[in-house]
Amino acid sequence: MLLFDKKILLSAFILLLFYSCGMINTHNGVYVAVFTDRAITADTLIIYKNGTYKHIIYDNDSDRLVNINTGTWERNGDHLLFNDFLFNEDDIYYDYRVKSYDKYLINSYLPINPFSNNLIINYDSEFYYKKIK
């Protein structure tokens, strides 16, 4: 019985070590941006296990799609790096004159909050992506 308990304890320790070192990917899933009570946009980020993502932004006032883009992502220490990302601090809105936001795509590092696993958009404004699924 004592030997069995040691095996369980050792297995739990190894799993915790892998998790804390980032060797187990826990970042895939669906995230929604949390801005303010009266956000201009509905911003959804879907992160896939295969190293790709889909980013969808809607204008809340007009209920129109602003942009959908896809790209790749990777973990870099305590940040996630998104390639070809439309960085949104709730300042993008539907404009019929804009046919594409491709020229605004950048590589973006989003810090990972170690306590909540949320992705920080802006520390000062307390904007972040909250994992919902």
Image: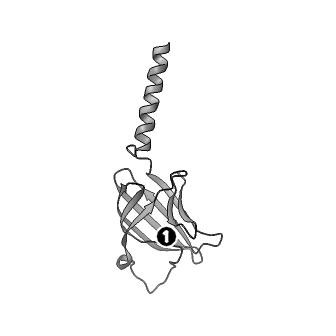
Q: Please determine whether, in this image, residue 105 is positioned above or below residue 111.
A: below
Question: What scheme was used to colour the molecule?
Answer: one colour
Across and down, in percent, residue 123 comes to: 54, 66
Task: Determine whether, in the image, residue 85 is placed left or right of residue 89.
Answer: left
Across and down, in percent, residue 44 comes to: 50, 63
| Residue under the point 36% across and 76% down | 102
Across and down, in percent, residue 22 comes to: 40, 46
In this orientation, which residue lies closer to the viewer: 99 or 132? 132
Picture quarter containing residue 127? bottom right
Amino acid type, residue under disc 1 in the picture: Ile
Element type at mark 1: strand
In this orientation, which residue lies closer to the viewer: 7 or 105? 7
Q: Please determine whether, in this image, residue 9 is positioned above or below residue 24.
A: above
| Residue under the point 55% across and 52% down | 116
The extreme right residue here reads 37
Q: Please determine whether, in this image, residue 54 is positioned above or below residue 88.
A: above
The extreme top residue here reads 1
Task: Determine whether, in the image, residue 23 is placed left or right of residue 130.
Answer: left
Q: Please determine whether, in this image, residue 97 is positioned above or below residue 88.
A: below
| Residue under the point 49% across and 83% down | 95
Q: Which residue carries the number 1 mark?
A: 57
| Residue under the point 44% across and 51% down | 27
Tally of marks: 1
Q: Residues within 10 Å of mark 1 (few under 14, many from 20)?
A: many
In this orientation, which residue lies closer to the viewer: 3 or 71? 3
Across and down, in percent, residue 48 comes to: 39, 53
